[in-house]
Amino acid sequence: MSIGELGFVILAAVFWGLSGGLSGFLMDKGWDPLIIAFYRGFVGLICISIWYAIKPTRWNKKLILWSILAGVGVAGNFIFYNISISEASVAVAATLMYTAPIFVLLISFIFKLEKATLFKGMAILSVLAGVILMTEVYSIDSDSVTLLGIAAGLGAGVSYALFLFGFKYASRHGKPQNVLTAAFLTFSLLMLFVIDYSETISVLSSPDIAWVVLLGLFGAGLSFYLYVKGLERTSPSTASVAAMVEPVTASLFGVVVLSEILTGIQLIGMGIILATVTFLSFKKE
């Protein structure tokens, strides 16, 4: 692994964070979170499909199967995350979803995909501590959190790990344009079961359509291309920790664009995450 390849993963997470802030902007304008999630992936599918049409490559069975798994993981992550928000809160949902590095390390260790080292364990605990401080989940009233909200949040974390492994192994059997086309097609088809069709169609004639397209370009098309390229020679656990710059970017977007205010505790949490990812970037495996 080189810093450049890990840098692709980090840059992808930065774009995810920006798209998270943009999603929040669209939610404030009244759009349903699942509609936003659908268009994020669907616009990404259109972008990648154009790329594939210009530069087609061969398909194979393993590429298709791993790409479908990745698409299922992305859909599950979006759906479970939104359920967790509705049943608990954004803070609880985000904290539970970012337990993904733990699931990634456990899966990697069980299937002997990589060694579970003390450094990796400490890095995961460090970013989790940073996320807890950033979301201030410790101050949430326990009565407002349901069992379904907790289960859905953990489901989002497992789905996150699922699409990481899906993209990781799909990239070994084909080019990014093939991988992403199959994954986003799977995602779009699954999302059709959970979205409201009338509201989905109304987006096309809405003045917010430009923001929706921008969300898809940065939140799916460009970011996932960088992610797949970065995963080619980056271990799953390292990639999962590096991607934790996403909540930091989303928070900074909220401060700069949405005029939100961060507390001192949240700034400490942000600093912990950035310090861990920076150290990880310069430590050779």
Image: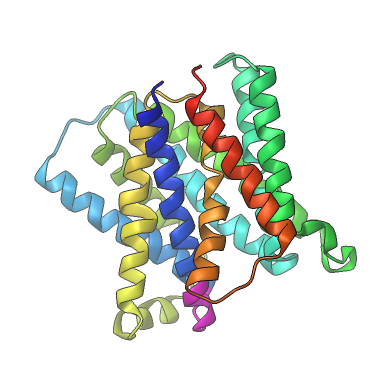
For the point 56% across and 54% down, which residue is it? Answer: 248
Instruction: Say left or right for 219 vs 262.
Output: left
Quarter holding the N terminus is top left
281 or 17: nearer the eye?
281
- Residue 106's place in the image compared with 162, above or below, is above
Residue 36 place in picture, x, y as percent? 45, 69
Residue 191 among magenta residues: no
69 or 268: nearer the eye?
268
Residue 218 place in picture, x, y as percent? 35, 57
Residue 66 seen in this snapshot: no
Q: Residue furthest right?
A: 143
Q: Residue furthest left?
A: 54
Instruction: Say left or right for 206 vs 46.
Output: right
The way the protein has been coloured in the rendering is rainbow
For the point 45% across and 34% down, which residue is it? Answer: 166
Residue 155 place in picture, x, y as percent? 66, 47
Instruction: Say left or right for 223 vs 30.
Output: left
Q: Quadrant of residue 211?
A: bottom left
152 or 266: nearer the eye?
266
Q: Bounds of the magenta span?
A: 24-32
Residue 104 place in picture, x, y as percent? 60, 31
For the point 60% across and 36% down, which residue is it? Answer: 276
